[in-house]
Image (cartoon, grey):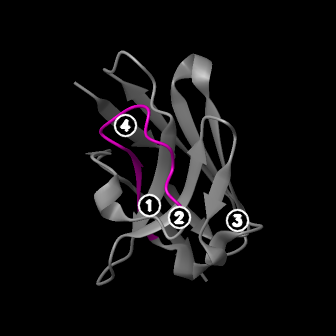
Amino acid sequence: QVQLVESGGGSVQAGGSLRLSCAASGDTYSSRCMAWFRQAPGKEREGVAAIDRDGTTTYVDSVKGRFTISTDNAKNTLYLQMNNLNPEDTAIYYCARPETWYYACPPAPLRVGYFGYWGQGTQVTVSS
């Protein structure tokens, strides 16, 4: 059974940094595509970034130049380095992967329905 467990959330002031981690387990093969989503109160879940096994990355415009998605395949772990955070980044952050391990990452914007496995989420709060 696939499990995705996020960690690294917290509270920071505007301009600060956080690094989120997502530990994946339970599948025979590691997923080709991994992604981060976020959901702010009262808003729809939004795709933030995705990474394909060939290294191709996708970002939502609002985080380009500030966030970096990466993986450590040896550890089956996904990361999201978030720099220069602002209050608009406040949300619950989720990692996600498609149900089928060999599916490539979709083009932007990332669709929630493409991803079948989700973590429980980690809260990120940015104060001004």
Query: Which residue type does callout 1 highlight?
Result: Phe
Residue that carries the numbered disc 2 in the rendered image: 48
Above or below, 65 relative to 53: below
Query: Which residue type does callout 4 highlight?
Result: Val
Q: Is residue 128 left or right of residue 30?
A: right
Range of residues picked out in magenta:
91-107
Q: Is there CB contact under 8 Å for labels 3 and 1?
A: no
How far apart marks 3 and 2 lie (CA) works out to 18 Å
Q: Where is residue 59 in the image (x, y as percent from the top left)?
A: 62, 64
Does dot 1 land on a helix, a strand or a loop? strand
> Between disc 3 and disc 4, whose residue precedes?
4
> Between disc 2 and disc 1, whose residue precedes?
1
Q: Which residue is depicted at the point 33% across and 62% down? A: 112
Q: Is there CB contact under 8 Å for labels 2 and 1?
A: yes
How far apart marks 4 and 2 lie (CA) works out to 17 Å
Residue that carries the numbered disc 4 in the rendered image: 5
Q: Which residue is depicted at the point 42% across and 65% down? A: 38
Does dot 3 land on a helix, a strand or a loop? loop
Q: Which of marks 3 and 4 is in front?
A: 4
Does dot 4 land on a helix, a strand or a loop? strand
Q: Residue furthest right?
A: 65
Q: Which of marks 1 and 4 is in front?
A: 1
